[in-house]
Image (cartoon, helix red, strand yellow):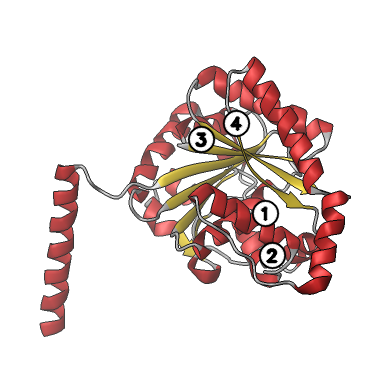
């Protein structure tokens, strides 16, 4: 009885605090970041998972929303099996808070439904209604990362235009760059203001990343009047594909590999933090030199 009474007192105190926060307007706000790409195959979803883990290493509480409706697969990359997903929310069977699954290191995931035609072909009002339900997540995490589908579909645009910030993933390949630019152009035609970051994935050297990012940002500024921030780059690392096969994020399986260190730097850049990697030794030093000049 005493334990039950104590629980009720704690609950009442919590509710009182929430009400006071709402009245004062100082409720903790969650930073909403959408991750997207112009085409598939550029490593967008893998980036999302490992980026979330990197943010958590800086003390951030993170929730991932798998919004690749119909072809969701973040749960596969994490090696978890959620009991419920977005299908149950859209059908009115579950509340969005009820379908949050806890993954590695406490990373929280809202799973999409894979292979479900109904999710891939949602009507506009259904998407808008679903986005409005995301308000329930306010204050539950420091950062909500929305992993969208690739391309220019209405569903993708809805999430991009509703987010505080957008991270666009591309590779140095001309087709990936062209499609990424087309995505940004379509987005800015409907939303004149907003924060857009660029991440160049699968690069052979830092020089290649800088050239790719410079070309992209210069064209965007000239023709779209948009200032895109170059958030960072990720080396083409064989350990990335290895981690996918064993369904374990490379940030956890290979924390010292080049891709993991790149992700850590990107997270630090976003949070205005300083990332100091662990000493890698002389061998690692020469490896980095070769990649820089490659």
Q: Is residue 285 left or right of residue 213?
A: right
The nearer-to-camera label among 2 and 4 is 4
Q: CA distance from mark 1 to mark 2?
A: 9 Å
Residue 94 in view in this figure: no
Q: Position of residue 153 (x, y in %)?
A: 62, 29
Mark 2 lies on residue: 250
Q: Is residue 254 left or right of residue 101?
A: right
Q: Position of residue 247 (x, y in %)?
A: 69, 66
In the rendered structure, which disc, 4 or 3, sits on the residue that comes first in sequence? 3
Mark 4 lies on residue: 228
Residue beneath the point at 35% across and 43% down: 135
Mark 1 lies on residue: 46
Which part of the image, by quadrant, shows the N terminus? Answer: bottom left
Residue beneath the point at 39% across and 55% down: 141
Q: Is residue 225 left or right of residue 239?
A: left
Q: CA distance from mark 2 to mark 4?
A: 27 Å
In the rendered structure, which disc, 3 or 1, sits on the residue that comes first in sequence? 1
Q: What mark, if any, has residue 159 been given in the picture?
A: 3
Where 145 falls versus 58 (above or below)? above
Q: CA distance from mark 3 to mark 2?
A: 27 Å
User: Which secondary structure lies at badge 3?
Assistant: helix
Q: Nearer the viewer, residue 270 or 18?
A: 270
Q: CA distance from mark 3 to mark 1?
A: 19 Å
In the rendered structure, which disc, 3 or 2, sits on the residue that comes first in sequence? 3
Q: Quadrant of residue 49?
A: bottom right
Q: CA distance from mark 4 to mark 3?
A: 19 Å
3 and 1 marks in contact (CB < 8 Å) = no
User: Which secondary structure lies at badge 1?
Assistant: helix
Q: Is residue 257 left or right of residue 22?
A: right
The nearer-to-camera label among 4 and 3 is 4
The 10 Å Cα crowd at callout 2, few under 14, some 14 to 19, many 20 or more, is many
């Amino acid at each position: 009885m005493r334990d039950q009474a104590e629980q009720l007192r704690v609950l009442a105190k919590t509710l009182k605090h929430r009400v006071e926060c709402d009245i004062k307007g100082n409720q903790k706000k969650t930073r909403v970041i959408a991750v997207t790409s112009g085409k598939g195959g550029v490593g967008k979803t893998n980036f999302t998972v490992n980026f979330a883990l990197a943010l958590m290493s800086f003390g951030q509480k993170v929730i991932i929303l798998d919004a690749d409706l119909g072809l969701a697969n973040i749960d596969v990359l994490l090696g978890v099996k959620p009991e419920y997903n977005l299908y149950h929310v859209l059908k009115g069977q579950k509340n969005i808070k009820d379908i949050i699954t806890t993954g590695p290191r406490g990373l929280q995931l809202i799973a999409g439904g894979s292979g479900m035609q109904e999710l891939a072909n949602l009507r506009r009002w259904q998407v808008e209604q679903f986005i409005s339900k995301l308000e329930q997540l306010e204050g539950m995490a420091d950062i909500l990362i929305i992993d969208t589908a690739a391309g220019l579909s209405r569903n993708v645009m809805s999430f991009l235009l509703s987010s505080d910030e957008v991270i666009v993933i591309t590779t140095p390949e001309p087709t990936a760059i062209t499609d990424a630019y087309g995505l940004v152009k379509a987005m800015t035609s409907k939303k004149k203001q907003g924060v857009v970051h660029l991440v160049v994935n699968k690069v052979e050297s830092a020089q290649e990343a800088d050239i790719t990012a410079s070309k992209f940002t210069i064209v965007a500024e000239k023709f779209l009047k948009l200032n895109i921030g170059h958030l960072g780059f990720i080396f083409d690392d064989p350990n990335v594909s290895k981690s996918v096969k064993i369904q374990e994020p490379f940030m956890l399986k290979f924390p010292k590999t080049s891709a993991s260190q790149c992700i850590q730097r990107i997270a630090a850049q976003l949070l205005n933090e300083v990332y100091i990697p662990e000493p890698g030794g002389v061998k690692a030093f020469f490896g980095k030199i070769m990649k820089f000049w490659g």
